[in-house]
Amino acid sequence: MNREEFHAYADKKIDEIYDRLDELEKKRDSATAAAKEKYSDQIEAAKKKRDELKADLQKLKGASGESWEELKLAFNESAESFKVHLSNIKARFNE
């Protein structure tokens, strides 16, 4: 995958994360007061991680040579880890 293809792929990943967070916020907003309080902190922490991932993507877009490859791998690992984190939050809503 060349740089341009990877940038498009990474942008799509970020969009998916935004969509999943929106979905979690809607579930939280329709939950009981106790559940809202329980999940609000987790969702806010996830938003901070999302923002960090987006900042990492911006660094990746400006990187060159060897650093680009390293940042690309780090971005992929972070994005996958973040997706698992969001899935875990979503699963807790369904408990």
Image (cartoon, grey):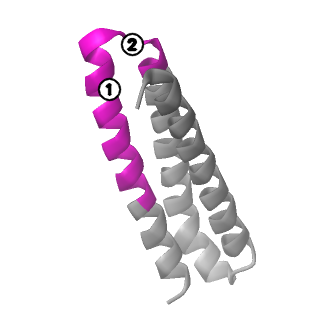
The disc at residue 13 is none
What residue type is disc 1 on?
Leu
What residue type is disc 2 on?
Ala
- Could you give the CA–CA distance between mark 1 and mark 2, rounded to whole angstroms? 8 Å
Asked whether, in this view, residue 75 is left or right of residue 58, the answer is: left
**Majority secondary structure in the magenta region:** helix
Q: Residue at x 46, y 44 (%)?
A: 49
Q: Residue at x 47, y 31 (%)?
A: 6
Say if 17 sits above or below 63 in the image. below
Asked whether 69 falls inside the magenta stretch, the response is yes
Which residue is at the front of the view, 77 or 42? 77
Say if 88 sits above or below 35 in the image. above
Query: In which quadrant is the N terminus drawn?
Result: top left
The percent position of residue 3, horizontal first and vertical second, equals: 45, 22
Asked whether, in this view, residue 4 is left or right of residue 68, the answer is: right
What are the residue bounds of the magenta stretch? Answer: 59-83
- Cβ–Cβ under 8 Å for marks 1 and 2: yes
Q: Residue at x 35, y 54 (%)?
A: 81
Badge 1 or badge 2: first in the primary sequence: 2
Asked whether, in this view, residue 19 is left or right of residue 73, the answer is: right
Asked whether 94 falls inside the magenta stretch, the response is no
The disc at residue 71 is 1
Q: How many numbered tags mark residues here?
A: 2
The disc at residue 63 is 2
Q: Residue at x 36, y 42 (%)?
A: 76
The percent position of residue 60, horizontal first and vertical second, equals: 42, 22
Mark 1: secondary structure: helix
Which residue is at the front of the view, 20 or 69? 69
